[in-house]
Image (cartoon, rainbow, N blue to C red):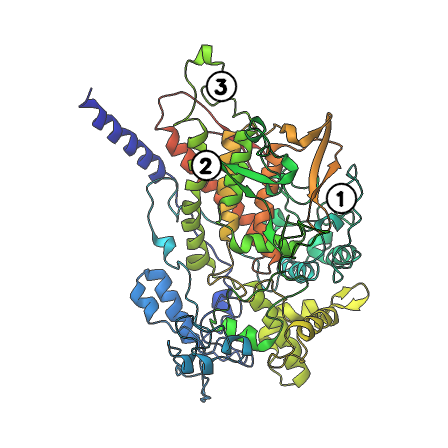
Amino acid sequence: MQTARPTTAETVRNEAAKLASHRPHPHHLNNKEEYEYRDYSDRPDCPITCLASFTKGLPHDLTTGLLLNPVDYKLFVAGIQSGDPVDFQHTPLGPGVKFVTPNCPSDERIKVDSTAATRASAWCSNMAKEYPPNPKNPAEKGAYVRAWESAGAGNVFDLQGPDAQAVTMPPAPRLDSDELLGEIAELYAMALLRDLPFRHFRLPAGCSARPADKTSPPPCADPDSFDHATAFLNSLAWFNGGALAKPPTLAEAARRRTLQADGSNGFRGQTPGEQVGPYLSQFLLLGNTSLESKMPAPAARQADQGYIRYGAISIEQKVRIATPCKDYLTIWAPFIDVQNGADLRGLESYEAPTRPTKKNPCPPDGHRFITTPRDLATYVHYDALYEAYLNACIFLLSSGAPFDRGIPFLEADVFDKQQGFAHFGGPHILTLVTEVATRALKAVRYQKFNVHRRLRPEAMGGHFDRWHKINALKTGKLAPFRPIAEGLSALHWNGTAFPDVVKAHNAANNATYFSDEVDSAADSYLLPMAFPEGSPMHPSYGAGHATVAGACITILKAYFDHGWTPPAWFDDAQPVAYEPSNDGSRLIAIELDKPLTVEGELNKLAANIAIGRNWGGVHYYSDYIESIRLGEQIALGLLEEQKLCYPENFTMTVPLFDGGAVRI
């Protein structure tokens, strides 16, 4: 037996490797824009300016925001494709200086090093120049540059699941497409709604709040703005089903959406169950009570108190309250610094805790339930990537959620004679739901860096801003920005020209929070961002959060009975859900006309986390919808290989994001 075991183990590993190797590696197709956009004069002797490509961190022209020297982009791509760290060390990172030559910009630039004087002088904005001093050297000021994140991860091999290059995504929307116009318009609309409580996203028919919430939303949140936003988006061909300029591709047709004025699907995902009940998944709000209720008071807590029990400790499902109505990168100087790699992380501000008084001994402590889109953006700004799905898993386990009927050891102990634990039990699923995350990240890094290299929404906002500035100056250099800015310029928001709405929003924001910044009074059409550093230092398509969401949620749907409804989602046999009050201090029950299900709330959880990044301004809708599908492929492949390792004969039925199901 001792001799047979190593041979059998080798056979199982070989079978898993054979299964993985027999998966066809697809062709990875991008949208070709990287090769098509040249500099504004369109001279064939000048390299491309990469209008549609991710260039953050490379030196940019301080006036146009376009790439300073296209040769830098070629070095950037060379390092990505080789995976050799030495190639990245030769790639320029940080701001530069453009020297006018008869043909193209030269390769000379400021070298941003670790000395305070050099770093401070390299930046345009006060925010970057006066970045909080180094604690070890208080005299040192000036933001550091920020390196690209795991650009070579797509070249890494793995020992389980599909190879990082064995899964793919369709080409990203092009700048001249109705889809892209819809996506960037949606992100501007989301930025203007960032402080409106989710309760004011009108509920679908059959939902009513109980009891009434009398707290008021923040003064900057107009309750009518949701209706204005949906009407604004409904005017676009991408959303209203109107005629398109050209037939959409299959991928575009699959992503196409139609908004409704009743708010049942505005700014939501589109997978099964997502549009049922309130906007936020119950897994982001409720606590688990089954184990706690068996403990003596005061340890026992109700689900609507929002504590997730981790063994002997509990974690509260609340976030820090970011300063309401405060957006970032709405001024050109900090915007261009961030495009040039300035690391402004950690400069966002939060509400201070209220001090106790005799009348109010337990005042707000600066945290609340996820109440507004800004809160959701704060959550996904600092989450541990898989934490929401680990919390959901713990919630389901402690709620006694049944496993999929194909999994072993579900009968009474007297029949099965064993229980699941190390396999087909809590420790197994808890480990697996986190284990799949790193494999998803490698696959999406390959798509991000090696295939698509799609620019971030903040850069699209920069193009929109420059279009208006250059148009006003009558310089004749509008060509690079025409694919995106002309469409936005023609839109209207509640009877007002959309650019004027953006300009007014940014002007109020800058006057309130950044009046001492360089050119703070200048007109700005930039995309308001929730984070001072803008997006991460990697391309937009696909989305890391969304890919991990797709992978982790697929694991949960494979193991748990996805049609089950936890007891906490009923009240006296009436289906209920919970959502935060306007001030986020408590959860309020909502009566539903039909119960929520595990599948629907898990799908909603994936969308909340992925679209939460959109609420921050760092991703597009197509980044979300295609990336959760990518993560799904990774999880299914991992489950197929792991099934070979067990002697038990079992199955798992996994509902898919596109509808239907597969059986493992």
Characterize the local packing of mark 2: few (<14), some (14-19) or many (20 or more) Cα atoms within 10 angstroms: many
Residue 496, horizontal then vertical, whole percent: 79, 68
Residue 410 numbered mark, or none = 3
Q: For the residue labelled by badge 1, is the local secondary structure a helix, a strand or a loop?
A: loop
- Give the number of callouts: 3
Q: For residue 459, say whether it is visible.
A: yes
Q: Quadrant of the N terminus?
A: top left
For the residues labelled 3 and 1, the Cα–Cα distance comes to 38 Å
For the residues labelled 1 and 2, the Cα–Cα distance comes to 34 Å
CB of mark 2 within 8 Å of CB of mark 3? no
Q: In terms of image quadrants, where is residue 487?
A: bottom right
Residue 359 higher or lower than 492, as above or below: above
Determine the residue located farthest toward the top in the rendered image: 414
Residue 636 numbered mark, or none = 2
Residue 10 numbered mark, or none = none
| Identity of the residue drawn at 51% across and 69% down | 344
Closer to the chain start, of discs 1 and 2, is 1
| Identity of the residue drawn at 78% across and 50% down | 261
- Tell me the kind of residue under disc 3: Leu
